[in-house]
Image (spheres, rainbow, N blue to C red):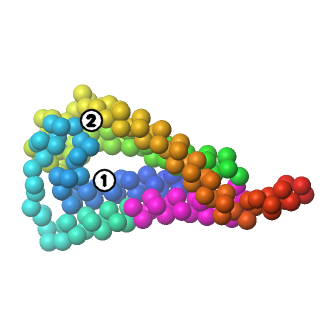
């Protein structure tokens, strides 16, 4: 149950990150992973209200803290509860892959292809966005999915080394 609550926290953080970047900071540099037509169409925007960019950066920092905090809490909770390697590995994969599914389903399929989210903040790209863009970044998604296996394994090893049940102590606990 804890893992799924942490996953929801990471999803909320990812959405807050996107909203802060697209809706408030509105810096073209945040569009480097977008399709080229969107990168070319996005124009600089003045602040709609005083402090808009500062609010956006605060949202981004909070979002990064939420996502990083979910991973750190997940590790700490696993150490505290005596997780083994595979339990840590499964938890981290659920967090990372769950967030990736959220990214693909919500950001790419819904927000980019089927809603007016991006054109709401950047009307000049209204004619560019649409269902034809879904899957434009499949290679980067695949690379991330594969890298999540490696990162999850590394985090699991690190957590196992921090666990009070690692090494000699683990054999005495399992013998009980």
As drawn, 150 above or below 24: above
Quadrant position of residue 136: top left
Residue 98 visible at all: no
> How many marks do you count on the picture?
2
The mark that comes first in sequence, 2 or 1, is 1
Q: Secondary structure at mark 1?
A: helix
Please, which residue is most extreme toward the right here? Answer: 176
As drawn, 155 above or below 58: above
- Tell me what residue is drawn at x 73 percent, y 65 percent: 164
Q: Which residue is mark 2?
A: 113
How far across and down, in percent of the image, does residue 3 sit?
Answer: 58, 53
How far across and down, in percent of the image, does residue 152 sit?
Answer: 55, 48
Q: Secondary structure at mark 2?
A: loop
Please, which residue is most extreme toward the bottom here? Answer: 50
Q: Which residues are magenta?
A: 64-83
Q: Which residue is mark 1?
A: 18
Q: Mark 2 to mark 1: distance in Å? A: 15 Å
* Mark in front: 2 vs 1: 1
User: Dot 1: few (<14), some (14–19), or many (≥20) neighbours within 10 Å?
Assistant: some
- Tell me what residue is drawn at x 10 percent, y 57 percent: 45
- Tell me what residue is drawn at x 21 percent, y 60 percent: 24
């Amino acid at each position: 149950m804890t893992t799924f609550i942490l996953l929801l926290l990471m999803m909320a953080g990812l959405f807050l990150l996107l909203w802060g970047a697209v809706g408030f900071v509105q810096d073209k540099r945040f569009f480097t992973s977008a399709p080229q037509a969107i990168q070319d169409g996005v124009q600089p925007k003045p602040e709609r209200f005083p402090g808009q960019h500062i609010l956006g950066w605060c949202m981004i920092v909070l979002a990064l803290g939420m996502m990083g905090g979910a991973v750190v809490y997940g590790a700490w909770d696993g150490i505290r509860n005596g997780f083994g390697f595979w339990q840590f590995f499964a938890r981290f994969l659920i967090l990372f892959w769950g967030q990736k599914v959220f990214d693909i389903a919500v950001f790419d399929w819904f927000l980019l292809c089927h809603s007016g989210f991006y054109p709401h903040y950047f009307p000049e790209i209204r004619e560019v966005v649409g269902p034809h863009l879904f899957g434009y970044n499949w290679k980067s998604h695949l690379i991330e999915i594969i890298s999540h296996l490696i990162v999850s394994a590394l985090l699991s090893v690190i957590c196992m080394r921090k666990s009070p049940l690692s090494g000699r102590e683990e054999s005495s606990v399992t013998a009980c």
